[in-house]
Image (spheres, rainbow, N blue to C red):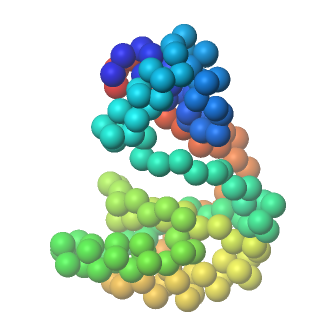
C-alpha cells in the first residue's frame, strides 16, 4: 500500500458514493488506474464493503446503551454459545469480546427507556450464560465514528 492507496481509502471512507472520476482527480490519477486500485484494495481486504450510515435519531432511536455482560464461565463452548446467540439478535448493534471486568461489551439502540427495558429483559438477559449485566446510557455523542485513520504505518 502506498500513499495513493491511502488517499483513495480516505476518499472512499468519507463518501463511498462519490464517482470514481472524482476520486481519481483528487488523488491525481486516471479513471481506469484509480478503478484498478480500488478493485485491488477490495480484493486485498482493505475494503470490507460499502454502506450507508443511517440516522438512529431519525429512525426513532433516541437512546444508545453500552452494556457490559459477564458470563458464568469463560470456556470456549460458553463463549461460542453466547457469541452465536448475540450475532442472531438484530437488537445487538455491536458485540465485542473484552478484557477487564466484563467479558463482552454490547451496543444497543432504543426508542425510549421502556423499549430498552424490553430489550434488556427479552434479549440481553436471555442470552446464554449471562451472569451479570451493567448498562450505561450515552448522554451525548461528542465524536461519532467516522472511520479509521489511514496512515503510513498501515
Q: Tell me the residue at 44%/32% (across/down).
A: 38
Q: Does the rendering let one see residue 101?
A: no
The picture places residue 83, in percent across and down from the top left corner, at: 34, 72
Residue 118: quarter of image:
bottom right
The picture places residue 67, in percent across and down from the top left corner, at: 52, 66
The picture places residue 68, in percent across and down from the top left corner, at: 47, 66
Where 6 sits versus 94, above or below? above
Q: Does the rendering let one see residue 38?
A: yes
Where 75 sits versus 38, above or below? below
Quarter of the image where the N terminus is located? top left
Horizontally, is 46 left or right of 109 in the view? left
Closer to the camera, 149 or 108? 149
Residue 21: quarter of image:
top right
Residue 101: quarter of image:
bottom left
Q: Tell me the residue at 78%/60% (across/down).
A: 57
Q: Tell me the residue at 48%/23% (across/down).
A: 32
Point out the residue furthest to the top here: 28
Horizontally, is 133 left or right of 64 in the view? left
Horizontally, is 1 left or right of 35 in the view? left
Task: Count every numbered label the image shows and give the total.
Answer: 0
Closer to the camera, 98 or 43? 43
The picture places residue 99, in percent across and down from the top left corner, at: 32, 54
Amino acid at each position: 500500500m502506498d500513499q495513493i492507496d491511502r488517499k483513495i481509502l480516505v476518499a472512499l471512507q468519507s463518501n463511498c458514493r462519490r464517482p470514481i472520476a472524482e476520486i481519481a482527480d483528487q488523488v491525481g490519477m486516471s479513471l481506469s488506474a484509480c478503478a484498478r486500485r480500488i478493485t485491488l484494495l477490495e480484493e486485498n481486504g482493505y475494503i470490507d464493503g460499502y454502506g450507508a450510515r443511517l440516522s438512529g435519531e431519525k429512525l426513532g432511536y433516541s437512546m444508545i446503551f453500552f452494556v457490559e455482560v459477564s458470563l458464568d464461565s469463560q470456556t470456549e463452548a460458553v463463549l461460542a454459545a453466547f457469541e452465536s446467540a448475540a450475532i442472531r439478535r438484530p437488537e445487538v448493534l455491536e458485540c465485542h469480546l473484552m478484557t477487564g471486568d466484563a467479558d463482552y461489551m454490547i451496543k444497543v439502540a432504543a426508542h425510549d427507556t421502556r423499549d430498552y427495558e424490553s430489550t434488556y429483559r427479552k434479549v440481553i438477559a436471555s442470552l446464554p450464560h449471562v451472569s451479570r449485566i451493567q448498562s450505561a446510557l450515552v448522554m451525548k455523542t461528542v465524536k461519532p465514528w467516522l472511520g479509521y485513520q489511514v496512515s503510513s504505518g498501515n
